[in-house]
Amino acid sequence: MTNEVKTKSRNYTIPLITITLLFFMWGFITCMNDILIPYLKQLFKLTFFESMLVQFCFFGAYFIGSLIYFLISTSSGDPINKVGYKKGILFGIFLAALGCVLFYPAATFSSYGLFLGALFVLGLGFTVLQITANAYVSLLGSEESASSRLNMTQAFNAFGTTIAPVLGGHLIFEFFSAADGSFSAVATRIPYLIFAAILLLVALLISRVKLPSFQTAEEEIEKGFGAFKFTHLKFGVFAMFCYVGGEVAVGSFIISFLEQPQVMNLNEVVSKNYLSLYWGGAMIGRFLGAISLNQSISQSKKAIYMLGAATLVFLVIFSIVDLTFSQISFFLVFIVLNFIAFFIGKAAPARTLSIFAAVNVVLLISAMVNHGELAMYSILGIGIFNSIMFSNIYTLAISGLGKYTSQGSSLVVMAILGGAIVPIFQGYLADHYGVQHSFIIPVFCYLVILIFGAYCTKYLSHVQHDADAKSGH
């Protein structure tokens, strides 16, 4: 029997707000990789393949960290269950802060190897946070509303990724850059020390907040490989591999894509603002997803709330990016398409996942075959349809695992390895066949996600948050 909180009606608002702040910070720092890639590429005269080692080391740490976690859980029981979610989250924050601090010696000695080492440690910290914080959010309420809660916290994660290209890009490309405008490794020292300090402040806040405990009785801790008996979990792990790989690959190449003469021929200072639109789209979609997948809101109110949220977030993005309204007005079309896709999905996580993946396949093909603004709009529109994918794949994959939930969660987080592997393959294709043609790799990733959504629609009816869920079927 789970020793959750004794009263199921307990208010989880304060813990949820606190964890959401953490999601914002790690979204911000993760997206800084998209700024580092073109920066380090020019600084160290790297090929596309070599520059993608940034993502390989960062997301490779997710695989190593979660593999270690999984092996411990199979031999000795779930570590998080033993120490508690709060201690696990704090350990992850401290490890991530250490990774940020390690940027100082890397920049001082101007060593690409040290930069990669710092990114690996940073990735290990975020691995612990992914395993603990995502599962923790899913436990802060009913299973039926887990996707909605995760979409809300992921929306603030996306808010961090939206700000990062503009603020982080300004700090590295402009504010802390050399006076003559040349590239220098020291431009990364102060920004990452600031990030470390903010992470430690968040850790201090979390340490002072009373977080509810969710632990399993010691005699019920499961060892072995029991989680592997769930087919939807194994499929979900592969889908998460493809999702993170596709999202990271697209985000990593946006600046290089917009630099292409046949696309927009933009420099880094301008294109970083469009990168913010890509991540800003994810933020809009996640807020809309949190509303759409919330079964406590009536259909009539959902449309009103979603329209208000989309308008508000669009205005926030407009105030952040250094672009005119005419330059970002095309995004309104994608917001409308996102609305339509949500209502076709009918608040069912699996069905909505398939629809969004299908749209991204079409957008990627458009980005590959078109030029100029149409190609740019197509690649930037992918962000808003990425929005609900992480939370929906995650909750679908671990749904119904019971005592294997934490073990299954570590397997899903292990699949974030896709963010290390897929960009490497795309980098190889970009070097040999051009940046535009290299987007064939993410096309295959989103096709896998489409099929996973269709599979869950058919075989996981118990997590479809539609009329059947309301009637108890």
Image (cartoon, rainbow, N blue to C red):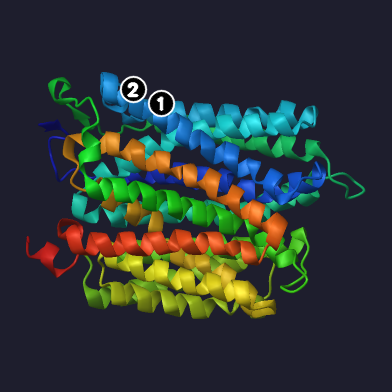
Quarter of the image where one finds residue 162: bottom right
In this view, which residue lies farthest toward the left? 472
Tell me which amino acid carries mark 1.
Ile
Report the side of 438 relative to 231 (left or right).
right
Quote the CA–CA distance across marks 1 and 2. Answer: 6 Å
Q: Nearer the viewer, residue 249 or 215?
A: 249
Q: What residue is at 40 percent from the left and 68 percent from the top?
A: 356
Tell me which amino acid carries mark 2.
Ile
**Residue linked to disc 2:** 72
Q: Position of residue 333 (x, y in %)?
A: 50, 80
Crowd band around label 2 with a 10 angstrom C-alpha radius: few (<14), some (14–19), many (20+): some
Q: What residue is at 56 percent from the left and 29 percent from the top?
A: 121
Crowd band around label 1 with a 10 angstrom C-alpha radius: few (<14), some (14–19), many (20+): few
Q: Secondary structure at mark 2?
A: helix
Where does the C terminus fall, quadrant-wise?
bottom left
Quarter of the image where one finds residue 116: top right
Quarter of the image where one finds residue 8: top left
Report the side of 164 relative to 95 (left or right).
right
Q: Secondary structure at mark 1?
A: helix
In this view, which residue lies farthest toward the front? 432
**Residue linked to disc 1:** 68
Report the side of 44 relative to 168 (left or right).
right
Q: What residue is at 18 percent from the left and 59 percent from the top?
A: 459
Q: Which mark is residue 175?
A: none
Q: Nearer the viewer, residue 134 or 424?
A: 424
